[in-house]
Image (tube, helix red, strand yellow):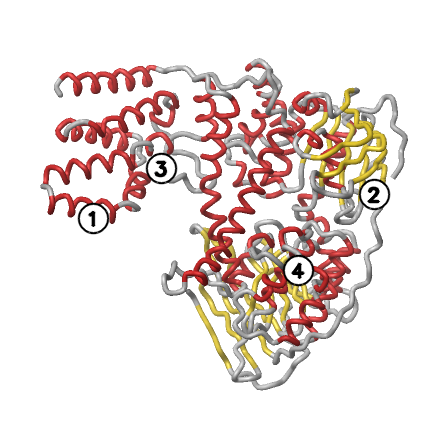
Amino acid sequence: MSRPAQATAVIAARAAAFRYAGQASAVGPFDFAAAAGEFHLISGPSGCGKSTFARMLCGLVPHLYRGELAGQVHIGGRSSDTAPLWWLTTVVGFVAQNPRAQLLGSTVRDEIVFGLENLGLSRRAAHERLDHTLATFGLECFAERDPRSLSGGEQQRLILAAVMARQPRALVLDEPLAMLDTASAMQAVSELGALRHQGCAITAFEHGPALLAGVDGLQRLALPAAEPSDEDFPDLAMEVPPFRVVVNGLRVELGGRPVLDGIDCTLAGGRVIAVVGDNGSGKTTLLRTLVGLQAYTGRVNTLASDSHHTPRLGLCFQNPDCQIFNASVRQELRFGLSEIDEDFYRSVVRLLGLVRYEQTPPLLLSEGEKKRLALATVLLRPGLSGICLDEPTLGQDAHQRRFLGRILKHLTAAGYLCVIATHDVEWAVKWSDEVFLLQAGRLTTCEHPRATLSREESGTAVRNCDYVPKGFPLPPGEGQGEGIRCPTTSPHSSPRFPRTSSSGE
Amino acid sequence: MMRPRAQCELPRDSFLRRADPRTKLFLCAATSAAVMLPLAHLAAVLTAYSLLILAARIERQVLAQLRRAVVLLIVLFVADWLWIGLDFATLIAARLILLITGFSLFFATTTPDELQAALEQMRAPARLAFAFATAYRFLHLLDSEWREIVEAQQARGIVVPALSWRAPRQSLARAMAIIVPAVVLTTQRAWSITEAAAARGFESPSRRSSRRLRLSRVDRLLLTAAVGVAVCLLAYR
């Protein structure tokens, strides 16, 4: 990437590179300049240095990170390595990927006030600015709420408000849309567009330009990265007998509030089923219920063609760090397994692209590799027939998302059931066999991804979270808007199914 | 210490909720110091403290706190009664109850930001006040994170049993399945907070708290009553 540093730029980097302490290679060098009213989108795949570069542009690197900064980064006319960090933050605001991890206050009001207190404003000025910020970002009605009780989109808006209340001249955002559902992401994009019109220099780092592409006057830049190599995809040395999971009248309550209600559906082995919906719609709870981690009322029956086989599902959590703890990938994969089918082990390790990392400590893997490792540890459980993955594409670049899709296709070819909770509708449409749409705890649509895609292309749609469960014209051959059309077909059709069932707690 | 409130739950409104955090800190410290009093005086303090708890409508939280220590209390009471006597057993039980619930009054009626403001106004360094308030704010997350890790390991087939002396190595290895992720997640969270605070200028030398704490009439009344009780107890000791 090369852009000449401009004299009028709020942020300017020239041959800027950073080498973390203890690491041989450096991130960079980068040239970049952002002037008032400009909106830059810097994209690139995972591991190309986006987060480090973002932190260089706001001064967190080198102030908070140990290492060597080469080249020059000027923020508000001062060199970032000599100016104090607190001063740099008055010029440039920074918003990281996960809004929940950045919350510092007990109430929305306290969250915004925290940054204002650090400016040394008088109490009166601080309160005036607080009221103005609450009104500007539409947060007045939340002022006394605990920020952790807000939705993901509202939390992101709050963090943006807390940063912008300090009136910085520039804003750096590290994957600001990664944790948001589509509707919240679209709202965040429009808010960023409005800030740009007010003269703020905005620099956003994202894997891909999809959601930000429509921003007026957007300047795109790409960080260079090595071409990902094509992975080898062997077949799994395992065949899962046909089975189905039939859910009837499922209801889950958390804290006295129904999170899932009246769920009826059939999930067949050998299929990828994507569960989509807004943040808080009950996607994760549905997965937890399917694997038996959540108490419920209603019925969840498993129907297996082989009477000796009791289908069981495993779950990969959103954060793979919850599941990995051993000294090497090999130890991690073999932990707790009394008998290991070596052929199956080798095929899983090869399928998930972990062969070269077998002796590597798991905590040193990238986020995508950790997610694949967590998937492998679950897959290696004996007697497993299906897997549930909670937001597996979160924060993953296009290559990693494609890789995951291909892995799932190979698993379903071996008869596994794959249930994926995601707010990444594009990925769901491309790689799943069925899409289940959850809205406020209710399953409003079960359909073939083509129908979802068709609705997306037609303009209304999933992208704007304007789901049309009934009466929407579907493409030829898909019927005409019957509303809920729960799947009943399976590639492994017609065997006799002896019944094993569970209900309630 | 008081178990933190459930996530997203702000304290219920009461006169103690509205009282100055410094007053509440003083009351709690005085109550905890009262454990050194003899039984009769201790009973008076316990009665006064119970009335305050009822008035603040936080009896549910305090009882929940006591429930967790009830086994220990019973064992100590019975042992002391058997080996020493009823008076001593009652004294020790009363002291423990006061120690366990001593700061409930503060934590059930005060938000972390109010704690931070109180500490800053008492001239504690901003860093220290922020560290205390942040630790208090995130205590409840440790509990939910721990449960999430246990479930995540269950989902991959690892059930963490109670420590078994018959197979200590295996027990320890399985305990690591919880401890290592807990340490990793806590460190990640601590780093995110550090970054978020630094990105909003936390180290600024011109930092100025926007909360101005002032002692109200209720505060003065509470402080006077606390000091009065303390003087009386000392005088009649």
Name the residue carrying label 4.
A359
Q: How many marks?
A: 4
User: Residue B75 — which label?
Assistant: 1
Secondary structure of the residue carrying numbered label 3: loop
User: Residue A223 — which label?
Assistant: 2
Q: Position of residue A353 (x, y in %)?
A: 72, 63
Name the residue carrying label 3.
B2
Structural distance between the alpha carbons of marks 1 and 2 = 66 Å
Q: Is residue B178 left or right of residue A24?
A: left
**Front of the two marks 4 and 3:** 4
| Picture quarter with the C terminus of chain A | bottom left
The chain letter under disc 1 is B
Structural distance between the alpha carbons of marks 1 and 4 = 51 Å
Quick check: A338 above or below A35? Answer: below
Q: Is residue B219 left or right of residue B37?
A: right
Residue depicted at 80% across the width and 44% down the height? A43
Badge 2: residue crowd in 10 Å (few <14, some 14–19, many ≥20):
some
Q: Is residue A24 left or right of residue A128?
A: right
**Front of the two marks 3 and 1:** 1
Q: Is residue B78 left or right of residue A98?
A: left
Q: Position of residue B62 (x, y in %)?
A: 30, 38
The chain letter under disc 2 is A
